[in-house]
Image: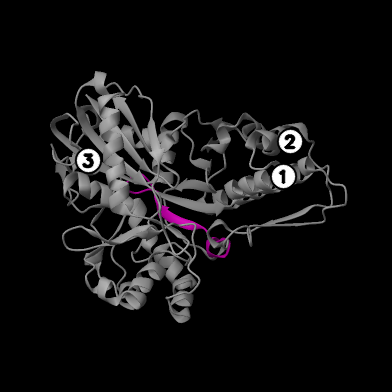
């Protein structure tokens, strides 16, 4: 028997398995399909599900075939801001605008946006208001597509959608649903003032369960050709960054995480939800962790996008040459360079607002600009980690570096040089997919104790 982890990501859909003993199996991947409409990229949940099901079937026929039937699965996905409207039968009504896109005209009124971004609301939801999350996206449908909105029965993220396709049950992850800004983070209760102002009801959202909770039995019709063990079930995965952090924590014990993929995201584990004014000023996220009573402080930094931009500007997109520059250039070679990086979620189309460089002298070499820029980002991340740890009431201790860019030895060496902290460099190539597989195995094997049903009650 084996257990499956599914990662619905920005660029790729990935699957990975573990056997009954916890031994990981090689991962499989395909490109995440996108739909282009009016020069904007969308994710169609129906297309994504079909691609996922095909990938799982191929993986079961090949990589996982020697390990017997599928015993269970867990699903992780990109953030809740990517959600879709579905009707009463669970059919998608409108695709999700890709999270990196921006519509030219806002649908949410300015007064509501300011109210959602107030410190008072931050004390409830734990989040600052951002463009193109649930408030803006549901307002777009309510204002621009009123007939479609009237037919909308649920508003669901991709993790919830794929879990429903596999089980027929509507359940969501606590690490996803609170990003809607419609729930009290401390209690997980629907926040009526926000829902009323946004024209939403609790019924628009699937019941939220913690990571590892029982989501339902795998329908035999959902994965044609995949041999299922008797009673094979899906358990809750959740937000991809949280699932990856759980897996890296299990290997390292770290409570401070720095992950760089498309963006850089800093996470600090904490046992309390304490939304202070300083957290608000820094724009930190408070979110649910992978255990029932745990929380995370999170902060995005646009390092991944900046690295991509630098590679395009100076090396025609060649990352090998960029990282060669980084390792071969001494720090401080451009003392006049001043770097400003915009927040990941607010950058406008293209490079505008993402990166500003000032004080570049005539004759400066690209390698010096690359080194100076990445020095700035590393120092910014370290300063931010220090403030986040202070707010979380913990020492920085060991920091776990994870994600695709930290698998570059030059990038890991650069952080070792800039930071005077013990670092754990995660060896995991696919921490989200392998982490989801580990969640399924841990929850569904008898050694890990009781499972929970949709009401949070223990099951045998």
Vertical comparison of 138 with 21: above or below:
below
Checking the image for residue 314, the label placed there is 1
Tell whether label 1 touches label 2 (CB within 8 Å). yes
Residue numbers of the magenta segment = 279-294
Vertical comparison of 365 with 154: above or below:
above
- Residue 229 horizontal/vertical position (percent): 15, 29
Mark 2, residue position: 325
- Quarter of the picture holding the N terminus: top left
Vertical comparison of 386 with 250: above or below:
below
User: Which tag is nearer the camera, tag 2 or tag 3?
Assistant: 2
Q: Earlier in the sequence, mark 2 or mark 1?
A: 1
At 63% from the left and 45% from the top, the residue drawn is 307
The color scheme shown is one colour
Q: Name the quadrant containing residue 148.
A: bottom left
| Alpha carbon separation for disc pair 1 and 3 | 46 Å
Checking the image for residue 380, the label placed there is none
Checking the image for residue 234, the label placed there is 3
Mark 2 surroundings: few (<14), some (14-19) or many (≥20) residues within 10 A: some
At 57% from the left and 35% from the top, the residue drawn is 406
Mark 3 element type? strand
Q: Earlier in the sequence, mark 2 or mark 3?
A: 3
Q: Nearer the viewer, residue 318 or 457?
A: 318
Q: Earlier in the sequence, mark 1 or mark 3?
A: 3
Mark 1 surroundings: few (<14), some (14-19) or many (≥20) residues within 10 A: some
Tell whether label 3 touches label 1 (CB within 8 Å). no
Q: Nearer the viewer, residue 452 or 239?
A: 239
At 41% from the left and 32% from the top, the residue drawn is 250
């Amino acid at each position: 028997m084996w257990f499956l982890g599914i990662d619905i990501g920005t660029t790729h859909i990935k699957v990975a398995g573990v056997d009954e003993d916890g031994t990981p199996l090689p991962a499989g991947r395909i490109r995440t399909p996108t739909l282009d409409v009016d020069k904007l990229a969308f994710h169609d949940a129906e297309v994504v599900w079909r691609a996922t099901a095909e990938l799982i079937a191929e993986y079961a026929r090949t990589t996982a075939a020697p390990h017997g039937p599928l015993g269970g699965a867990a699903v992780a996905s990109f953030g809740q801001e990517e959600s879709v409207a579905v009707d009463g039968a669970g059919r998608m009504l409108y695709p999700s605008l890709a999270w990196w896109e921006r519509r030219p005209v806002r649908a949410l009124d300015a007064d509501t946006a300011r109210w959602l971004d107030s410190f008072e609301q931050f004390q409830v939801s734990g989040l600052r208001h951002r463009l193109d999350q649930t408030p803006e996206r549901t307002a777009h449908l309510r204002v621009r597509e009123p007939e479609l909105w009237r037919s909308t029965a649920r508003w669901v993220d991709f993790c919830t959608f794929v879990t429903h396709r596999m089980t027929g049950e509507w359940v969501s992850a606590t690490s996803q649903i609170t990003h809607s800004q419609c729930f009290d983070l401390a209690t997980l209760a629907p926040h009526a003032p926000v829902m009323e102002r946004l024209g939403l009801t609790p019924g628009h959202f699937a019941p939220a369960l913690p990571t590892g909770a029982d989501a339902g039995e795998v329908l035999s019709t959902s994965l044609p050709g995949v041999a299922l063990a008797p009673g094979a079930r899906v358990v809750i995965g959740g937000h991809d960054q949280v699932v990856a952090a759980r897996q890296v924590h299990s290997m390292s014990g770290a409570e401070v995480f720095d992950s760089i993929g498309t963006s850089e995201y800093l996470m600090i584990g904490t046992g309390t939800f304490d939304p202070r004014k300083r957290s608000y000023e820094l724009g930190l996220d408070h979110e649910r962790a992978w255990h029932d009573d745990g929380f995370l402080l999170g902060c995005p930094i646009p390092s991944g996008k900046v690295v991509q931009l630098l590679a395009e500007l100076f090396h025609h997109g060649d990352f090998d040459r960029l990282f060669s520059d980084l390792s071969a250039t001494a720090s401080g070679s451009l003392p006049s360079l001043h770097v400003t990086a915009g927040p990941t979620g607010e950058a406008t189309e293209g490079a505008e607002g993402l990166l500003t460089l000032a004080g570049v002298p005539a004759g400066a070499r690209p390698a010096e600009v690359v080194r100076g820029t990445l020095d700035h980002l590393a120092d910014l991340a370290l300063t931010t980690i220090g403030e986040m740890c202070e707010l979380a009431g913990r020492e920085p201790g060991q920091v776990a570096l994870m994600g695709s860019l930290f698998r570059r030895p030059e990038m890991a060496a650069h952080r070792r040089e800039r930071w005077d902290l013990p670092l754990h460099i995660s060896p995991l190539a696919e921490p989200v997919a392998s982490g989801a597989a580990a969640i399924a195995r841990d929850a569904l094997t008898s050694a890990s104790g009781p499972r929970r049903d949709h009401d949070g009650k223990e099951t045998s």
